[in-house]
Amino acid sequence: MLAVRSINEADESRDIPHGHLDVVSLEGVDFGVARFEPGWRWSRDVGPIAGTDSCQFHHNGYVAQGHVHIRMDDGEEKDLKAGDVFVCDPGHDAWVVGDETALVFDFAGNIHDYAK
């Protein structure tokens, strides 16, 4: 099998406060491209939409641009910068650090439901 799709023809595109998300589904894999603007913070911008105190999604991702800080509910914290690959379990807050837009690619299995 060989399957190809363009993110420019996303199955779903939506604006969120201080950001934007495009999602493509391809042969059982959901691929998301998130753009988080300076000032974006999950707990402030997405939490009210999700109705939870912290993000309850599992993320498999790659930071292509910018700087994002993640704090897990148990207090563990990490900085993610351009070039970093990451896995993040449910139960976290995240925010953009600095004045550059963060561009994050996400291979989470349920990214279609993110920020809904």
Image (spheres, helix red, strand yellow):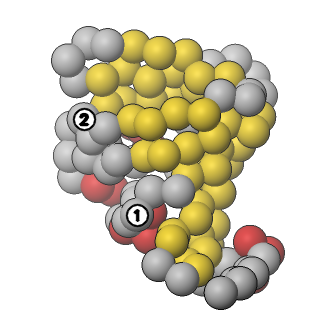
Q: Nearer the viewer, residue 53 or 106?
A: 106
Residue 44 at x, y = what percent?
A: 39, 36
Residue 41 at x, y = what percent?
A: 48, 33
Q: Quadrant of residue 111?
A: bottom left
Q: Quadrant of residue 33?
A: bottom right
The answer to whether one can see residue 36 in this image is no
Residue at the (53%, 56%) spot, across then down: 107
Look at mark 2 in the image and give the residue it sits on: 91
The quarter of the image holding the N terminus is bottom right
Residue at the (37%, 20%) spot, across then down: 71
Residue 78 tag number: none
Residue 109 tag number: 1
Residue at the (39%, 13%) spot, across then down: 77
Badge 1 element: loop
| Amino acid type for the residue under numbered disc 1 | Gly
The answer to whether one can see residue 6 in this image is yes
Q: How many marks on residues?
A: 2
Residue 23 at x, y = what percent?
A: 58, 70
| Amino acid type for the residue under numbered disc 2 | Gly
Instruction: Give the foreground label among 1 and 2.
Output: 1
Residue 100 at x, y = what percent?
A: 77, 28
User: What separation in Å lies between label 1 and label 2 (alpha carbons)?
Assistant: 16 Å
Badge 2 element: loop
Relative to residue 27, is residue 20 drawn left or right?
A: right
